[in-house]
Image: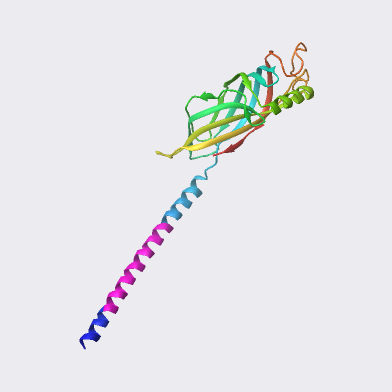
Amino acid sequence: MTTKDCGHDDDDHSGGGGGFFRLIIGALLFLIFIVLFVVFLIWLILRPTKPRFILQDATIYSFNVTSPNTLTATFQVTLATRNPNQRIGVYYERVDVFASYHNQQITLPTRLPPTYQGHKDVIVWSPFLYGISVPVAPYLGMSLQEDQNSGLVYMNIKIDGRVKWKVGTWISGKYRLNVVCPAYITFGGKGNNGNNGNNGNNPGLGFNTAIKYQLASGCHVDV
């Protein structure tokens, strides 16, 4: 009898432990479900959308091939960004703008001032971009010569930054911002749709006459 009683006690303890374990698992699953539901509900209410960027224009002050593999360039670009969100603000904490040619950076990064962008707000920046005697890869030197012959240069204006989201009084952590804006610049006296060009004294890519190009180019944005 004593042996049988001990056996029943072991079964009771084992069943009780298993039930407690199942209770903990069920509570954790319920908690995970609640968290996911709250996140989904917040997303459904806020509908977060990344900012939109447009490269409005570019003024070229100099773009000179000073040697077969060296480039000197000075630009001023106008960038507009719009926050499409109705309930989310954007903090631009660190934003660098630079120009690239065939994925090679050809100007120093220009740091923009920290800015807060409210709901549906539009911000316009007009930074200067400088690159003095920037060495380029040999194959890019050949590409520049081809561009000189065609009278058209394709480059990108890029933005590398950090942003934070603001919802009410809550502010998120930092997120990486990458923006690429294509820019097609004409040279060699052909101008921009017949409205711009150099004065004919400096054919090809090398010139020092300020020329403004209206671009209105949409940008690709990754956050």
Q: Is residue 101 magenta?
A: no
Residue occupying the point 36% across, 68% down: 22
Depth check, front residue: 205 or 166: 205
Q: Residue furthest top?
A: 201
Q: Residue furthest front?
A: 138
Q: Is residue 57 left or right of residue 35?
A: right
Q: Is residue 30 magenta?
A: yes
Say if 26 sits above or below 208 in the image.
Answer: below
**Magenta segment, prevailing SS (helix, strand or loop):** helix
Say if 21 sits above or below 49 in the image.
Answer: below
Position of residue 68 measured from the top left corner of the image (x, y, whole percent): 71, 20
Q: Residue furthest bottom?
A: 1
Residue occupying the point 29% across, 79% down: 11
* Quadrant placement of the N terminus: bottom left
Depth check, front residue: 177 or 50: 177
Say if 173 sits above or below 197 in the image.
Answer: below
Q: Which residues are magenta?
A: 10-33
Work out whether residue 140 can be spotted.
yes
In which quarter of the view is residue 214 placed? top right
* Quadrant placement of the C terminus: top right
In which quarter of the view is residue 218 placed? top right
Q: Is residue 35 left or right of residue 161?
A: left
Work out whether residue 65 can be spotted.
no
Position of residue 91 measured from the top left corner of the image (x, y, whole percent): 47, 33
Position of residue 196 measured from the top left corner of the image (x, y, whole percent): 74, 18
